[in-house]
C-alpha cells in the first residue's frame, strides 16, 4: 500500500508521520515526476487552499491529479484539501479539482477565532472522535451520492462520496489514527478491485 501526499504547502508532514505509524509507504508530491509513481491513494493536506491551488497549477499538476481522482484514485482531503475537492466554494470561480459534489464555505468559523478542538461522533469511526479545526471550512450542501459522516453544531464536517473522503478538521494533528485507517481501508478496497480505478 503506497499513499501519495501532495506536499506543495501546509500540514503534509503530519500526514506522513501518521501514515508511517500505520506502516504504510508514502511519498511526497511536488513535481509531475513524483506524481508518476505508483500509488493506491492520495492525501491532500490542510494549509492555504489558494496557495496550494496556485502551486499545483504552476507545476502542471492540477489536471493530472483531477483526472486520477475522476478515474477513481482514492483521495483524502483535510481542510484546505476538502476545499480543493469541492465542486462549489462560496462565490469563488470553479478552478480547482472540483471532483466532489459538495458546497463548501471557507473560513466558516471566522478568521481569528476560528481554531478550536471538539469531540463528536463520526459515522464508521466512533462516538468520540477528536477534531482539531484551524480556520476551517464546513460543508453547506451535499449532492446525491454524498454520505454525511459527521456534523458539529448542525454543520457538516466530514463526508464521503465513493472513494473521496473529506474532513473540515485535521485528524493528522491528533493521536487518533482511526480516520487514516478508514481511508487506508478505502484504498485497500479500491486496489483489490484492480489497478484500473475506473468503476
Ligand atoms: N482557511 C484555509 C483555506 O481557506 C484552510 C485552513 C486549513 O486548511 N487549516 O484555504
Image (cartoon, rainbow, N blue to C red):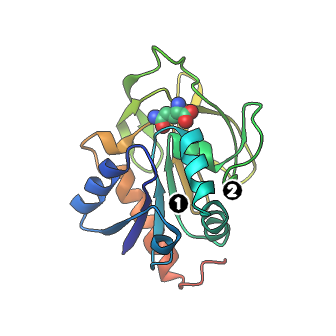
Using the image as rendered, state which of residue 119 and residue 81 is in the foreground.
Answer: 81
Whole-percent x, y for residue 177 in the image: 29, 50
Distance, label 1 to label 2, CA atoms, is 10 Å
Q: Quadrant of the C terminus?
A: bottom right
Question: Which image quadrant for residue 104?
Answer: top right
Q: Is residue 41 left or right of residue 146?
A: left
Residue denoted by label 2: 99
Label 1 residue SS: strand
Residue denoted by label 1: 75
Q: Is residue 15 left or right of residue 55?
A: left
Q: Residue furthest top?
A: 113
Whole-percent x, y for residue 174 in the image: 28, 39
Sequence-wise, which precedes: disc 1 or disc 2?
Answer: 1
Question: Which image quadrant for residue 145?
Answer: bottom right
Whole-percent x, y for residue 7 in the image: 42, 55
The answer to whether marks 1 and 2 mark residues whose Cβ atoms lie closer than 8 Å is yes
Using the image as rendered, state which of residue 149 and residue 191 is in the foreground.
Answer: 191
> Which numbered tag is attached to residue 48?
none
- In this view of the protein, can residue 149 be seen by the observer? no
- In this view of the protein, can residue 65 be seen by the observer? yes
Whole-percent x, y for residue 159 in the image: 57, 46
Label 2 residue SS: loop
Q: Quadrant of the N terminus?
A: bottom left
Please report the residue visible at 61 percent of the width from the left and 30 percent of the height from the top.
Answer: 106
Please report the residue visible at 63 percent of the width from the left and 69 percent of the height from the top.
Answer: 64
| Label 1 C-beta lies within 8 Å of the nearest ligand 1 atom | no
How packed mark 2 is, by other alpha carbons closer than 10 Å (few <14, some 14-19, many 20 or more), is: some
Using the image as rendered, state which of residue 108 and residue 122 is in the foreground.
Answer: 108
Amino acid at each position: 500500500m503506497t499513499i501519495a501526499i501532495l506536499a506543495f504547502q501546509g500540514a503534509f508532514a503530519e500526514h506522513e508521520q501518521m501514515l508511517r505509524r500505520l506502516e504504510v509507504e508514502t511519498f511526497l508530491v511536488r513535481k509531475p515526476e513524483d506524481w508518476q509513481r505508483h500509488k493506491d491513494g492520495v492525501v491532500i493536506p490542510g494549509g492555504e487552499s489558494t496557495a496550494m491551488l496556485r502551486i499545483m497549477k504552476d507545476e502542471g499538476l492540477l489536471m493530472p491529479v483531477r483526472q486520477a481522482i475522476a478515474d477513481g484514485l482514492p483521495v483524502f482531503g483535510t481542510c484546505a484539501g476538502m476545499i480543493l475537492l469541492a465542486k462549489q466554494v462560496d462565490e469563488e470561480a470553479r478552478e480547482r479539482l472540483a471532483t466532489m459534489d459538495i458546497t463548501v464555505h471557507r473560513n466558516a468559523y471566522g478568521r481569528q477565532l476560528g481554531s478550536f478542538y471538539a469531540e463528536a461522533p463520526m459515522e464508521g469511526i466512533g462516538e468520540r472522535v477528536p477534531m482539531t479545526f484551524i480556520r476551517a471550512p464546513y460543508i453547506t450542501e451535499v449532492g446525491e451520492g454524498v454520505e454525511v459522516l459527521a456534523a458539529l453544531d448542525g454543520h457538516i464536517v466530514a463526508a464521503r462520496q465513493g472513494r473521496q473522503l473529506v474532513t473540515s478538521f485535521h485528524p493528522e494533528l491528533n493521536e487518533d489514527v482511526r480516520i487514516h485507517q478508514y481511508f487506508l481501508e478505502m484504498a485497500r478496497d479500491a486496489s483489490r478491485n484492480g489497478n484500473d480505478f475506473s468503476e
